[in-house]
Image (cartoon, rainbow, N blue to C red):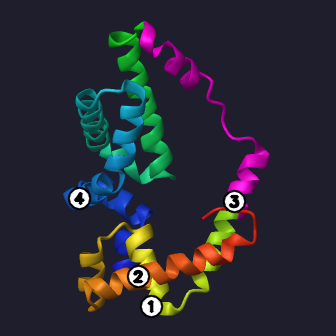
Amino acid sequence: MNESSHHSEPALLKRLAAGDVDAFQAIYDKYWNHVYGVALRLTKSPEQSRDLSQDIFVKLWTHREMAATINDIEKYLFTVSRNLVYDFLRREVFIESNRRFLQEYHGYEPPSPQDLAEIKSRHEMLEAAIQSLPPKQREVFRLHWIEGLTHEAVAQKLGISRVSSKTYIVRALAYLRERFSGTGRNF
């Protein structure tokens, strides 16, 4: 397996489905903050959010054989997080101070076709902008921002210094911000 497919989400999910602990750890490391953030936003309790987040990842591991059928791990984890936190709130924390929060939560509407088209358009524009970066900047950007590697890990993987990794990221971000500044879209 080549290095890029080794880290791709479909490959990670297949490895997870086969019981690969390293694949699970990679998913856990990449999505922990997102899952914890959803739980914290809904429960307003760091301790409870940690417990619920752990439960979510335990559930992912317990049902790992289904992982290969997941098309979008971020969306899957969001849905599992939302459902588990909702169950918790319904059982344990339905108090007046959470009423407004729960009303907002239940008021969520899925994106409209127009919203989805806008998201797709932004994604395509961003991908085109990333592709136009110089090769080394693009490689460092993808490893750091898309695969979530630290500057130290990027430096080690590419045989460059940590400072070079940071420099490539600063230049790439400056280029991307400049490229999007005239479009009325934020990066």
Name the quarter where the C terminus is drawn: bottom right
Q: Which residue lies furthest to the right in this view?
A: 114
Marks 4 and 1, how far apart in space? 31 Å
Residue 150 point in image, percent of width and height: 29, 71
Marks 3 and 1, how far apart in space? 26 Å
Marks 4 and 2, how far apart in space? 27 Å
Disc 4 packing (10 Å; few <14; some 14–19; many ≥20): some
Residue 161 point in image, percent of width and height: 26, 89
Marks 3 and 4, how far apart in space? 32 Å
Q: Nearer the N terminus, badge 3 or badge 1? A: 3
Q: In which quarter of the image is residue 143?
A: bottom left
Disc 2 packing (10 Å; few <14; some 14–19; many ≥20): many
Q: Name the residue under label 3.
A: 120
Q: What stretch is highlighted in magenta?
A: 96-121
Nearest to the observer: residue 38 or residue 15: 38
Please name the residue shown 31% across and 36% down the image: 56
Please name the residue shown 32% across and 53% down the image: 17
**Figure check: 153 above or below 47:** below
Q: Name the residue under label 4.
A: 20
Marks 1 and 2, how far apart in space? 6 Å
**Figure check: 63 above or below 141:** above
> What's the residue type where badge 3 is placed?
Lys
Residue 107 point in image, percent of width and height: 62, 24
Name the magenta segment's main secondary structure.
Answer: helix
> What's the residue type where badge 4 is placed?
Asp
Q: Name the residue under label 1.
A: 136
Q: Mark 2 points at which residue?
A: 140
